[in-house]
């Protein structure tokens, strides 16, 4: 967020700030749920082969754990890279 956007937010009436805050929280929750659902779907599809038991086999469990770890590490790395790029972006004053 650049300085002009922050200044615009600061000059908003309190009711608008509260609505904006609520909207941002809702968007963050939605994005978190999307990421979680994507993780579950991807790892389940990649790792679960059979439905002969109601619990995962040892191999499936290991695969799901590895898949989730890789997904989360990738997401963290992408977030860090985005932050690095965002810090280096020119600001418009």
Image (cartoon, grey):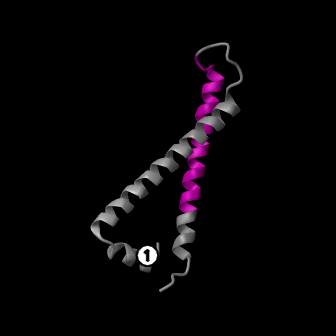
Identify the residue shown where x is 51% and y is 84%.
92
Q: Relative to residue 35, is residue 20 drawn left or right? A: left
Q: Relative to residue 73, is residue 13 drawn left or right? A: left
Percent from the top left, x then y, of residue 7? 37, 78
Residue 61: in magenta span? yes
Look at the image and give the residue range highlighted in magenta: 55-81
Compared with 63, 55 (above or below) is above
Identify the residue shown where x is 68% and y is 30%.
47
Give the prevailing secondary structure in the magenta stretch.
helix
Q: Nearer the viewer, residue 10 or 53?
A: 10
Percent from the top left, x then y, of residue 60? 64, 25
- Name, please, the residue furthest toward the left: 14
Percent from the top left, x then y, of residue 43? 64, 35
Say what secondary structure mark 1 lies in. Answer: helix
Residue 23: in magenta span? no
Percent from the top left, x then y, of residue 57? 63, 19
The residue that mark 1 highlights is: 5
Compared with 79, 47 (above or below) is above
Identify the residue shown where x is 47% and y is 54%.
27
Identify the residue shown where x is 57% and y is 48%.
73
């Amino acid at each position: 967020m650049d300085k002009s956007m922050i200044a615009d937010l600061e000059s908003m009436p309190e009711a608008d700030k509260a609505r904006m805050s609520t909207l941002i929280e809702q968007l963050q929750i939605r994005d978190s749920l999307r990421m979680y659902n994507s993780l579950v779907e991807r790892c389940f599809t990649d790792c679960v082969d059979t439905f002969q038991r109601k619990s995962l086999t040892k191999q499936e469990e290991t695969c799901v754990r590895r898949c989730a770890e890789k997904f989360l590490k990738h997401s963290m790395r992408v977030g860090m890279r985005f932050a690095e790029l965002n810090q280096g972006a020119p600001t418009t004053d």
